[in-house]
Structures are given as structure tokens and as C-alpha cells.
Image: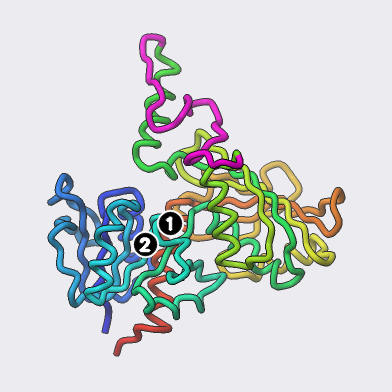
Amino acid sequence: MGYRVVVAGATGNVGREMLNILAEREFPVDEIAALASRRSLGTEVSFGDTTLKTRDLDTFDFTGWDIALFAIGSDATKTYAPKAAKAGCVVIDNSSLYRYDPEVPLVVPEVNAEAVDGYARKNILANPNGSTAQMVVALKPLHDRARIRRVVVSTYQSVSGAGKEGMDELWDQTKAVYNPTAEVPPKKFQKQIAFNVIPHIDVFMEDGSTKEEWKMVAETKKILDPAIKVTATCVRVPVFVGHSEALNIEFEEFLDEDEARDILREAPGIMVVDKREAGGYVTPVECVGDYATFISRIRQDGTVENGLNLWCVSDNLRKGAALNAVQIAEVLGNRCLKKG
């Protein structure tokens, strides 16, 4: 027996990826519903070899459905997630709405799969921020070996993290650079994104951090270990898909770079590509469409005691969003909602 599964926000970038990944990973689906807002009602989306017509999220009855993957943003989630949960459908939410709720587990299956056991408190599970998800996948096996004291992370985040509007803005501005009569002023981003980088994602907070940077700190502590100190600088770059991160990690004890490389090679969800030669590392364009979190440039940091540096790249629409949500559904099914 399989599950009756809902994908809410099925016409967006993440929602479409959720449908693709459910099909690719052969998630046991008996019936599937693709939901969208009324302005997208009737839009066709793909699920494997099947074409689905979207149904109205506003009037949908979640009674009798097992799992709902939400990719509709915090405002809409605030309205519809409680309705689904009350109807007995477990919500796996990709927005930031429930990530910091102590009653809602925040889950990255390679890191804290056991946390799904707490789903029944609200019938809701939260998916972390994309930049956090790939980072904690990289940190977990190293933390298990040597205990991480502090992480300094600089991110290079693609425009797809800002949705279709972000991707369109990069595309339109890039074309405009080569057309002297065209002008595409910033709308989605604060400054021109084409041929530029912007050290500003989400809103500024009182201490000078952006909320994106705060998210990485708070989520890492909730998912991995509250004792880890994290400081982040998050930067939007003119890349369509794929987030990159430069990580400086300080451990409580010495961890040799060769041992770290071996540990990461054996860790779930990670692919190590680390040759000290031209091209011996992974870049965002190479990770698009892949499930793995890629690790390169593993090396000792001699400027701090027990330090390592590494480079981390992942498809943010997959591991950073849709894939992680489907993996949560898989763990939920295996641990808590077993059928047949």
C-alpha cells in the first residue's frame, strides 16, 4: 500500500521539483493531488509520465490524505497548514513559518532523522533553509568525530533561492547589459544582480546581520547542536541554480584533513570531489539536478587551533528544498506511518 500525497504550490519552482523527485525516487504514491492558487488553477504539471491538472488550494479537503508537501510561502502556509494538520494530513512545510517553533521538528534526514518522531505534536514537520540544509549535511559526520566548536560560513547563493522572479530578473538584466537601449532596474533584489554580487539576503536585523544569516545560526543549533557557534555572511550571486558555501570549521580536537576527507566520503548524502589540480572541485553548474551535497577544497587551517576549511555546493532547489522535503516524507513513512 502507498500514500495519498498532496503537493501544495505545485506550479512553482520547488513544487515542480517535489513532483519530479517523488516520481524519480519512486515514493509509494497511491494517489497524488497538485494544488495551486486560483490564478494557476488548471495549469498542467508533470508527475513522472503522468500529467496532472492543478486543483484549488483554497477549497481542497485534506481529509483522508496522508502527507502534504507545502511550497507556498509563509503567509499561505499560516492559513492552510493548520487546516491540513487538523484533518489528519501530516504537513511537511518548506517555508520559514514553523522552523523555530519548539513544537515542530526541523529535519534534515542525514542529520536528525529521529526528530520526525515528534511530528504528532502539531502534525507538522519543517524543512530548513536551503543554505542551512547543505551545510549541516557536511558538518554532521565531522561533528560526530571531533565536536565542532565554531563555524564561519560565507555563502554564494543562487537567484533561484528567491523564486522565479529572481531567476527572471537575472535573465532580463543579463540581456540588458548587451543592449544599450534596454534598462532593467532591480525589483526582486536590492541592486543589479547581473554581473554583480549582493551581500544582502532577507531583511536586516538590529545587530547588522540579515535574517538569512540569522536563520543559518538558529537552524544549525536546532538541527545539529545548540552548543555550536555559527557566524554567517550570506551573498546573492548571479548563478541561476546551486548554492555554494566556504566553510571554516574549528573543532574541539585535532582532525586531520585526510581523515576528514575519508569521513565525508563515507557519509550519507555527500559526494567528495577534491583533487588539488585545475578543475578538481565542484561548481554550482555541475551540481544542478543532482541529489548530493558536494564537498571540495578540504584543507587544514593553520591560523586557528584544530581548524579545517572546505567548499560545499548543492542544488538548492533539490537538497535545499524539494529533495529534503521528500526525504522527510520517506523517513516519516518508514518510522511513523507504515502501511501494508
The residues tagged by marks 1 and 2 sit, at their Cα atoms, a distance apart of: 10 Å
Secondary structure beneath dot 1 equals helix
Q: Position of residue 275 (x, y in %)?
A: 72, 51
Where is mark 2, residue-wise?
93
Q: Name the residue type under label 1.
A: Ala
Give left or right: position of 105 versus 308. left
Residue extent of the magenta highlight: 180-207
* Sequence order check, earlier mark of 1 and 2: 2
Where is mark 1, residue-wise?
321
Q: Is residue 230 above or below residue 27?
A: above
Q: Position of residue 241 (x, y in %)?
A: 46, 44
Main SS of the magenta part reads loop
| Residue ID at (35%, 86%) | 338
| Quadrant housing the C terminus | bottom left
For mark 2, does the 10 Å Cα neighbourhood hold few (<14), some (14 to 19), or many (20 or more) residues? many
Q: Nearer the viewer, mark 1 or mark 2?
A: 2
Residue 60: assigned label: none
Give left or right: position of 87 versus 77. left
For mark 1, does the 10 Å Cα neighbourhood hold few (<14), some (14 to 19), or many (20 or more) residues? many
What is the number of callouts on the image?
2
Q: Position of residue 86 (x, y in %)?
A: 25, 73
Give left or right: position of 253 versus 55. right
| Residue ID at (40%, 74%) | 330
Q: Position of residue 37 (x, y in %)?
A: 19, 50
Q: Name the residue type under label 2.
A: Asp
| Residue ID at (19%, 70%) | 62
